Structure formats: structure tokens, C-alpha cells
Image (cartoon, rainbow, N blue to C red):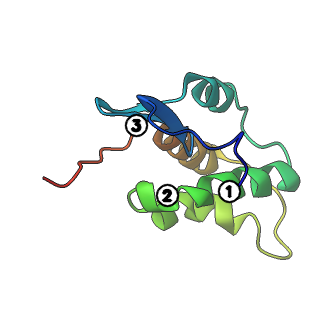
Amino acid sequence: MNWEKCHFMVNEGIVLGHNVSWEGLKVDREKIEAIEKLPPPANMKALRSFLGHAGFYQQFVKDFYKVARPLSALLEADITFNFDSECLNAFKVLKDALISTPILIAPD
């Protein structure tokens, strides 16, 4: 166990980019600013990077696969990279989902 990373008896802490306290969940502002400033992917490498990051949080995004389908279609073999308005809309929806606070309720 790394004692520098262990914190006991604290009022709040950051877990997976969310500030967790007895008051509830809040999104870490530094993470939000980085995603808000993220430009649309300009090439395949940037698209893979974005989808990899968004895929980590796919369980919190409703209909993730339906929303990300236009972006995933660009990754298929023998497809030219054409980032059209449908892809831009999917990018914006996923980006908005990543910066919103998920609604989690602790069991009673």
C-alpha cells in the first residue's frame, strides 16, 4: 500500500474525476475545462483517442452505442475520414454527456 495515496477520515475526495462528499457528487472542474475545450477530431488518431476516453464512461451515457455509431463508422477499414454534420452532432452529444454530473443515489 502506498501511504501517500491513502487518505482516511476525509470529508471529500476525487474518484474517477468526480468530487465525492457526503453532500453528493460534483464534477472536477479541471477535467470539465479540458473536455469543454476539446476540438472535434481532425484525423483518425484523434478520433480513436476521443472514443477511447468516452468509452471508459459508456455505462453512464444513455444509448452510447447509438450516439457513437457515426464516429465508429469512420474507423472501419477502407473508409475515408469525412467528419460530416452527423459526426459533429454525435461528438457534441458525447462531449456534453462527459461534462455533466451523473445522477447517482446512495441506497437508503
Please tell me how crowded label 1 is: few (under 14), some (14-19), or many (20+) other residues with Cα within 10 Å: some
Quick one: SS at disc 1? Answer: helix
> Which of these two is toward me, 103 or 107?
107
Residue ID for mark 1: 51
Residue 107 in picture, x, y percent from top left: 19, 55
Query: If you read the primary sequence from the N terminus, does the residue marked by circle 3 or circle 2 appear first?
Result: 2
Quadrant into which the N terminus falls = bottom right
Q: CA distance from mark 3 to mark 2?
A: 18 Å
Q: Nearer the viewer, mark 1 or mark 2?
A: 1
SS at mark 3 in the image: loop
Q: Earlier in the sequence, mark 1 or mark 3?
A: 1
Compared with 48, 103 (above or below) is above
Residue at 70 percent across and 58 percent down: it is 52
**Amino acid at the residue labelled 1:** Leu
- The image shows residue 52, relative to residue 97, as above or below, that is below
Residue position for label 2 = 67
Front label number (3 vs 2): 3
In the displayed structure, does residue 75 sit left or right of residue 51?
right
Question: Which residue is pictured at 66% across the width and 65% down the height?
Answer: 72
In-front residue for pair 84/44: 44
Q: Which mark is residue 101?
A: 3
